[in-house]
Image (cartoon, rainbow, N blue to C red):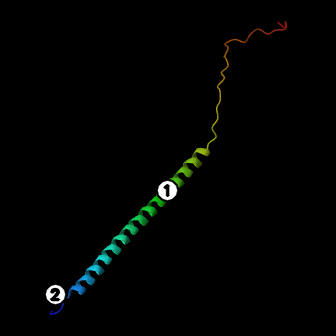
Amino acid sequence: MPGARPDLRKRSLPERIVYAVLLLAVLVLGFFFLVTALIATVILAGTILLRLWWVRRKLAQAAEDEFITTEYTVVEREKLDKLPPAEGGHG
């Protein structure tokens, strides 16, 4: 295919400068687009992880609140083999 690849050496100096500036502009815009996309991805991932942490925290708190917890003291009574003698002289 003749003419499909232009010979850059045959271009004039101003034409080469314009192409270099355009190439540089495209590279800079591409870099900033990539940085913006990465920042947006990090913010989105952070938001999703924060939401998951919040939901897990709420579920754990709900599971903990499901049971009533309190402090108590166990009082044991002595078991006697024989009943003590009755007071009052009935006997």
Q: Determine crowd level at label 2: few under 14, some 14-19, many 20+ residues with C-alpha closer than 10 A.
A: few
Say if 2 sits above or below 58 in the image. Answer: below
x%, y% of residue 26? 32, 77
Query: Sequence-wise, which precedes: disc 2 or disc 1?
Result: 2
**Of the pair 47 and 21, the residue shown nearer to us:** 21
The reply, left or right, for residue 56 in relation to residue 39 is right
Say if 24 sits above or below 91 in the image. Answer: below
Give the structural element (helix, strand or loop) at label 1: helix
Q: Mark 1 points at which residue?
A: 50
Give amino acid for label 1: Leu
Give me the C-alpha separation between circle 2 and circle 1.
Answer: 55 Å
Report the residue at 33% width, 73% height from top.
28
Quarter residue 23 falls in: bottom left
The reply, left or right, for residue 23 in relation to residue 43 is left
**Of the pair 67 and 40, the residue shown nearer to us:** 40
x%, y% of residue 39? 41, 64
The reply, left or right, for residue 90 in relation to residue 48 is right
Report the residue at 81% width, 9% height from top.
87
Q: Name the residue under label 2.
A: 7
